[in-house]
Image (cartoon, helix red, strand yellow):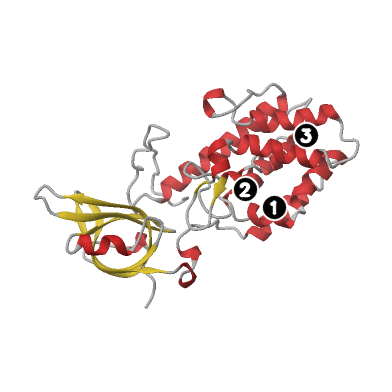
């Protein structure tokens, strides 16, 4: 039986499949009867689930964060689909494919990594090139780097998203190489490659996208500076001013204090990196949001983060 994904479900469908339990709560209806309210997810989206009959018996069978196999009927309530669940059982993680539950980049991670390494090898400054290669040729780091999302919610929220975002920022940097004078291109290129390395430790991405403990307590900017400083200390003779400048790029790439940046950009390279990083994140976030639009609809739903609707036209280019 072919797997049913959430984005394929239509009203009145009979649904049988495995989903990840994102939220679970026992609720009392207005009539005083208990029911289970669930939020289920897979790699294509999320959907509400309800268990009306026998809710108290089903409640101890699974927990939030478990995978469950259900039989349900798709119904519509207040113009939103939800699943009326008739039966369920908990599944072991070994019985499922995680790629069914986490979206992934359209590009192959190995291809993106190879392209990024080739760009990194064009850095002429030997200290910066050695620093970049210390990460790009470290299998323990790259195995996480190839898999990590770009963020939990805002942009590149899929497996391989961090690598895709990094490569995109670096390619944007290369496009402006000859446009501005007085820019240290090697420094900017190295900063583009390294600016988000801390996200491999900030984010967890085994069964869902979330923050690690050190991600919540420290954040990817501090973690990234620590990781880069550790590698700098292993490179004999690494110039102290160059070390300061590359760390400043990481510390300031969010641009503003209220955007989580410990420092605002104070070099030309830092200012450029901030804007290209922000540009790539926003364009990806908008494009992914547009993909959720229904066929034939010319406008997106309201986007809370951007505080606006987006015009899609006929959607042929998206």
* Residue 140 image-quadrant placement: bottom right
* Residue 142 image-quadrant placement: bottom right
Q: Which residue is mark 1?
A: 141
Viewer can see residue 173: no
Mark 1 or mark 2, earlier in chain = 1
With respect to residue 87, does 148 lie above or below? above
Mark nearer the viewer, 1 or 3:
1
Mark 2 or mark 3, earlier in chain = 3
Residue placed at 71% from the left, 28% from the top?
Answer: 248
Residue placed at 60% from the left, 48% from the top?
Answer: 162
Percent across and percent down for residue 310 are 39, 38
With respect to residue 226, does 26 lie above or below? below
Q: Residue furthest bottom?
A: 1
Task: Say what secondary structure mark 3 lies in.
Answer: helix
Task: Say what secondary structure mark 1 lies in.
Answer: helix
* Residue 83 image-quadrant placement: bottom left
Q: Which residue is mark 2?
A: 200
Q: Which quadrant is home to the N terminus?
A: bottom left
Which label number is shown at residue 187?
A: 3
Residue placed at 87% from the left, 35% from the top?
Answer: 238
Mark 1 vs 2: CB contact within 8 A: yes
């Amino acid at each position: 039986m072919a797997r049913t994904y959430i984005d394929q479900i239509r009203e009145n469908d009979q649904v049988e499949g495995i989903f990840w339990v994102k939220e679970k709560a026992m609720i009392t209806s207005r009539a005083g009867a208990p029911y289970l309210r669930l939020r289920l997810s897979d790699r294509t989206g999320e959907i509400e689930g309800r268990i009306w009959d026998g809710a108290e018996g089903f409640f101890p069978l699974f927990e939030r964060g478990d995978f469950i196999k259900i039989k349900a009927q798709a119904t519509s309530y207040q113009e939103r689909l939800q699943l009326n669940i008739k039966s369920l059982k908990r599944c072991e993680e070994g019985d499922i494919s995680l790629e069914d539950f986490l979206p992934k980049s359209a590009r192959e991670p190995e291809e993106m990594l190879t392209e990024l390494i080739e760009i990194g090898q064009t850095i002429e400054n030997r200290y910066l090139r050695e620093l970049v290669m210390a990460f790009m040729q470290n299998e323990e780091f790259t195995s996480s780097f190839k898999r990590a999302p770009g963020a939990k919610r805002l942009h590149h929220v899929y497996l391989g998203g961090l690598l895709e975002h990094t490569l995109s920022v670096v390619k944007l940097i290369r496009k402006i190489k000859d446009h501005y004078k007085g820019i240290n291109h090697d420094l900017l290129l190295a900063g583009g490659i390294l600016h988000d390395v801390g996200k491999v430790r900030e984010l967890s991405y085994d069964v869902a996208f979330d923050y690690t403990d050190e991600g919540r307590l420290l954040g990817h900017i501090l973690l990234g500076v620590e990781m880069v400083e550790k590698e700098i200390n292993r490179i004999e003779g690494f110039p102290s001013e160059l070390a300061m400048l590359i760390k400043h790029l990481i510390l300031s790439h969010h641009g503003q204090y209220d955007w989580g940046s410990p420092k605002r950009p104070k070099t030309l390279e830092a200012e450029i990196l901030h804007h290209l990083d922000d540009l790539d994140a926003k364009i990806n976030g908008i494009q992914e949001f547009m993909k959720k639009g229904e066929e034939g609809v010319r406008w997106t739903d309201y986007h809370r983060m951007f505080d606006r609707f987006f015009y899609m036209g006929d959607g042929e280019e998206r």
